[in-house]
Image (tube, coloured by chain):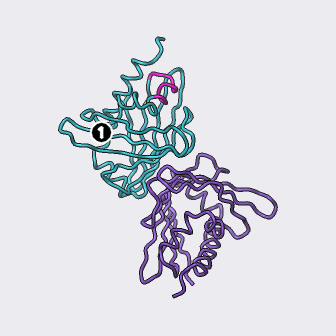
Chain colours: A cyan, B purple
Amino acid sequence: MGTTRITAEPGLPFIDIEREFDAPRGLLYRAFVEPELLMEWLGPAKYATTVERMEVRHGGSWRFVQRDADGAEHAFRGVFHGEPSVEGITQTWEYEGWPGSVSLERVTFEERDGRTTVRAHTAYQSVEDRDAMIASGMEGGVNEGYARLDGLVARLKPAG
Amino acid sequence: MGTTRITAEPGLPFIDIEREFDAPRGLLYRAFVEPELLMEWLGPAKYATTVERMEVRHGGSWRFVQRDADGAEHAFRGVFHGEPSVEGITQTWEYEGWPGSVSLERVTFEERDGRTTVRAHTAYQSVEDRDAMIASGMEGGVNEGYARLDGLVARLKPAG
């Protein structure tokens, strides 16, 4: 099983996430842009995710809502810059609970011998915004989500 | 006349631009999103700017092309995140000559006693991208453009 590596260098407004998956990159790319797949893995395990919009094109926008068992809701939205593809996805992110704190993410999928390394590099508008995101406990959510993604692609990948 | 202040702190991936204009903020906002106004001031003086697309909404995209007297062309594109308004504009930027180097800009318009301070804060995906932008001579283009914007809003503002 892969482990998720999260890097947040002090004094810089970046977060880097890296994890290797035992699946081809086309499948990983699909898991990032197809609502029915995204809903199965994204975010902390205690939330159910509903993708409300997913327009996969330059200028397309997306929005998803995460609800816990008590009905608490957390919504996120963003737009794609450039045509999303297996070569990579560039998109903005905004947690609607912190309106105005917008970040820019670049996700890439590097395949080698049938395994794919997913790298997500996010630039925040300030080091303070980045630090607040780390302090919010995003690390746990990323780890839980990527672990589910690992299980999802194992189920979906062609029998080898 | 105002002077344009450009700040690029070493080791951080940000560029900050600030300038005060003798005009209300509604006029400054229009100069940033109305193609016929934008074409009059944006960028270095030696280029003629053509705005090819300008969809002023969340997820809307824009593209403009700058041509010099020799016919050399430089194109830029981006998308709006959130509804642009006098409260501010958040948008991505990409110089098509450096594909993949995408940045995220937040422009605000602060009005006080009929004068407006425009602040543009841009976050790049790496310090290297930011440094390359500075090294490209963007400072001269910003200064020339903002000086023309100063003249433009002076012509357009209501007689006081």
User: Which residue is located at x 55 percent, y 81 percent?
Assistant: B2
In which image quadrant can residue B114 be found?
A: bottom left
Chain bearing tag 1 is A
For label 1, count other residues whose C-alpha is less than 10 Å away and answer few (under 14), some (14-19) or many (20+). Answer: many
Q: Which residue lies furthest to the top in this view?
A: A160
Q: Tell whether position A25 is magenta.
A: yes
Instruction: Indicate the position of residue B47 as horizontal and vertical percent values.
Output: 72, 65
- Tell which of B12 and B158 is nearer to you: B158
Q: Tell me: residue A101, above or below residue B36.
A: above
Decide whether the magenta segment is chiefly helix, strand or loop: helix
Q: Which residue lies furthest to the front in this view?
A: B158
**Dividing the image into 4 quarters, which one contains the N terminus of chain B?**
bottom right
- Tell which of B4 and A33 is nearer to you: A33
Q: Is residue A1 something one can see in this rendering?
A: no
Q: Tell me: residue B36, above or below residue A34.
A: below
Instruction: Indicate the position of residue A129 as horizontal and vertical percent values.
Output: 36, 55
- Dot 1 falls on a residue whose secondary structure is strand
Q: Which residue lies furthest to the bottom in this view?
A: B160
User: Which residue is located at x 57 percent, y 43 percent?
Assistant: A82
Q: Tell me: residue A27, above or below residue A67.
A: above
Instruction: Indicate the position of residue A125 as horizontal and vertical percent values.
Output: 43, 57
User: Which residue is located at x 55 percent, y 66 percent?
Assistant: B32
Q: Is residue B107 something one can see in this rendering?
A: yes
Quick check: B40 left or right of B70? left
Please state which amino acid type lies under the numbered disc 1. Gln
| Residue carrying label 1 | A66
Q: Tell whether position A139 is magenta.
A: no
User: Which residue is located at x 61 percent, y 63 percent?
Assistant: B35
Query: For the magenta stretch, what is the residue range?
Result: A22-30
